[in-house]
Amino acid sequence: MPKVIGHTPPWLSHPSPGGRIFSDPEAQSPASPSKRHSRKPTDGETSAAACSAAQRTIAYRGSEIFTVVGNKIRWADLARVKDEWEGQGHSRPGHSDKSGHQPEKRAYRTFKTPVYYQITNLTVSPSGHFLAISTEHTVHVAVLPDSSRLHDSDHSEIKLRTHHVGPTTHVIPEAALAAVLWHPLAASSASTDCLVTVSTEAAVRVWEFDHTDRWSVERPALAIDLRRLADGTSSDQDFEPSGFGKSRGFSADTFDMEAAAACFGGRGAEHEDPWAATSLWITMTNGDVYALCPLLPSRWKPTSMTIPALTTSAVAKKASMSPEDVEPDEKRAAEQRYEWVQELDNETLDSDDSTLLRPSILSAIPRLQGPFELPVDETSDDSEISDILVIPANLDEEDLFSGEDDYEILGSAKSLPFSIICLATTTHQLHVMIELEGVTGQWLPKKGKNHFSSPTWKAGEFVLLETISLGEETEVATCPMAINPDPTNPYLFFVTTGSGVWSISLEDWASRVAFEVTDEDSDTIDPGLQSRLKLACQGPICVSKELIPSQQLGSSTQASLSTAVFIEDINLGSLLLASSDGRAIAAQLDQTPFRASQMLTNEPSFSTSAASPFRASQSLMQVLQTEVEPMNHTPPTRAPYAPPQIFYHDQMAALDHVKSRVPPQRRSMLTENPLRLSPACLDVMTLAHRTFSHQTSVVETAAAELFRRCERLRQELGDQVKQMAELAERLNRLGPGSDYQEKVQTSNKSDVPHSEKLNDRIEAAKSRQKELYSRYERLRRKAGQVGHAKQELSIKEKAWVDEVDSLAVHVGIESEAPDQDTSKQGGDTALTSRLTAAKSLIDDLMAEAKRVKDQTNTETENKDDQQNTPDGKLRTSLGGSGNMSRFQRRKIQEVMEMVEREAAVIEAVQGRLSRLSV
């Protein structure tokens, strides 16, 4: 889903030269005098007829745009406009030169065309050489000059060479136009192309245009009346629409088959289904959808994959049909396709040119397929269909390249093998449906001698995926929606309503479903496929987002929004452009995350295990849900305020209009003579009042809105200044530590400024950070040295290892033996014997200690029997008894130390025995 990174750029807004592309006033042409347009709406009212069809008044060719202003076509190169605006130093919106005003310079050129009525549709051919200019009834094809000529410094008006398509066919009394399309497979050149027009009376005309031959635009090369073709039984019948001025009888198809819109089923890309670009889809106002396949000009240019794909599908279909189970009509259709493709294949082999002729073995007019059954409740509302978009199915390359060695190189990414049909209604609802059977070439049978029965055809059926509502319910229902596809991604398109532009994305849903329905292991039947498809369809199918909201359109409800076009250029980026009320309305998009995750046709397929499709589906969903880390873009601000265009209009134009309507003699009477009360003077005053009252009312409304905007801006600026002042005060009050009150009280007495204190705190924090980082580096290097391979032990480490080994031998832990159970049993026996010896030693030592203690007590009691000797020393009755006492005390001390050591050894042995579960 694209993201909005900005609104209307400043180089497309006033007062830049690019803002004048849509705003410079031009003379308005009258509306077509049809049944729907009985009169031209005034400036002060909103006409429903003005919104009866989508206004596609912007077309593009690369970075060049063609737009309608008044009834003249303007050309501008947006890339050049942007470069010139930036080259003048306007790096910011609202920048001006030193004199206070911006230089006047025209950024556009005007085309002069002989179109009388109001232009409603502009379409540039795929080759870029022609421009289709459409009104409500008429079509003109203009030959576009080369871009180098348009980039000249001369900004004078250019007169285009224009051809009126069907001057006796598309005329005012006839039916209005429903669609004007360029054929995607036309053999276009600098002088030739193919144009397809569809009128509201369900008439399809193919114009093979050649600007060197005026007769090519006089009569269509192929004309089909769908009302007659729907009841046709043979290809030999006349299906040409009734000519100009011929009376038409009443028919129910007059109301049931009123065409609303049309589109081709493909764009002529390599990866599309071969029948997609040859199929013309037509939708009626009541919701019926029809298809014409194949609809080709006399000379057409297929892609490199079209002919092989058509041949493969036709041959495979005919070979798989059995005569017993197939109906006659279906068998006849398969044979017709085989004959048609066979002639096409033979022509391809004989011709070296990429341009082919339409096969003549069958009629050039195909059978009308439909109406397709819509799963939409028609009684729910009275809405009408306003536009249609068909997303083509993908080419099945597995069947096309089966048996070839280079299939892995040519294989494309997973995508949907069925078509998606999107219908827009006048009540701002979008129906998204799928067509599973596929549309292939079908023709009516030739009239035979014994042909008495009419062919019976079974109409296809659509499957409704989702119905979404865009916009508000209170909007005018007569303003239809228009669909514009993204030229780079088939599963993304833009919908223009009467109040804004929405983007609709089917990318996520298509990625989930495509992987399940295009499984490589197609020989086995997966029982969980249905459950996984239901799970994939439970979530949101259509992801919608409003890119251009109604707030950008302003408060004016008179002007309608033109259909938005999506321009992607290396100099402009992604730009969604529309116009309303004489000004450009755009949205700058950032599709970088979206482009990174979209399914490209040349991407390799996901390499997953076919034995576990559910796990493969889950892995695919995880890949799709993992978004690319976006860049830090500035969040988009609200749309800038654009002053009403009344401020830029010529205010003297109304006065000139009044003067032009007053007769010359009356004008001199009013301007040269004194003013007198008379009916003539009253008429002039009434006319002036009607003219200037509307102008002053619009100016007053615009001035009031501008005043309210200025007041709002002043209040918001005051709030912002207040918030910044509070934030600055909080920053100034920051200080180290928690003693905030003391620092506030002593801030005036301190000689050190507050900024220096903050700088000291920052420097201290930086020094602490450096110290921590250095400690971390030392620890990291030391930890990296631990356990380093092939590093010798030091002398202390070797001595410590020897000591541990000797202690292990004394404790009873032997070295590792081959038999671990035997070593464990021997170790346990040694520990048990040592424990028994230690206990017996403890008993002996305790008995000895008790005996020594009793003897010591006895000696203490015999102190009274001691005698004094002549040398003054105290001696006992036994000789040498004093020396015996010191010796005994030393022995007792040694015994107690030995007891403590043995107790420690016993405790260690008991712990080891408990661990060994002895």
Image (cartoon, grey):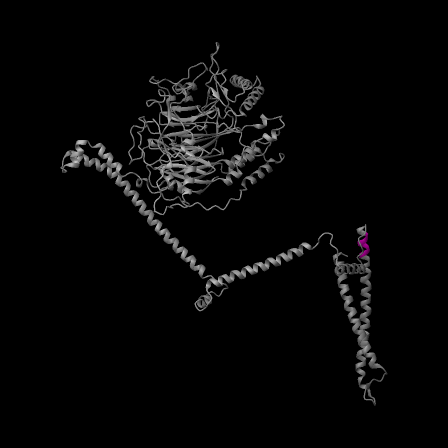
Residue at the extreme right:
879
State the image coordinates of residue 888 (x, y, percent, origin top left). 81, 76
Comparing 851 with 362, the one in front is: 362
Is residue 344 in view?
A: yes
* Residue 8 in sight from this viewpoint: no
* Residue that lies at the very extreme toward the top in this rendered image: 449
Task: Answer with the quarter of the image where residue 677 lies.
Answer: top left
Identify the image quadrant of the C terminus.
bottom right
Q: Is residue 826 above or below residue 847?
A: above
Residue 259 sits above or below residue 471 on the image: above
Q: Of 652 and 197, which appears nearest the observer?
A: 652
Question: Residue at coordinates 56% horizontally, 28% vertically from top-left?
Answer: 396
Closest to the observer: 243 or 592? Answer: 592
Residue sticking out furthest to the bottom? 870
Residue stretch rendered in magenta on the structure: 822-827
Q: Where is residue 76 in the image (x, y as percent from the top left)?
A: 40, 35
Answer with left or right where residue 876 lies relative to residue 665.
Answer: right
Task: Count the marks.
Answer: 0
Task: Look at 32% across and 22% down and name the residue there.
Answer: 173
| Residue toward you, 388 or 578 | 578
Q: Is residue 406 magenta?
A: no
List x then y, in percent, for residue 128: 44, 29
Rendered image quadrant of residue 120: top left
Q: Is residue 545 above or below residue 262?
A: below
Dominant secondary structure, magenta: helix
Q: Position of residue 491 (x, y in %)?
A: 49, 34
Examine the image and state in which quarter residue 699 appears: top left
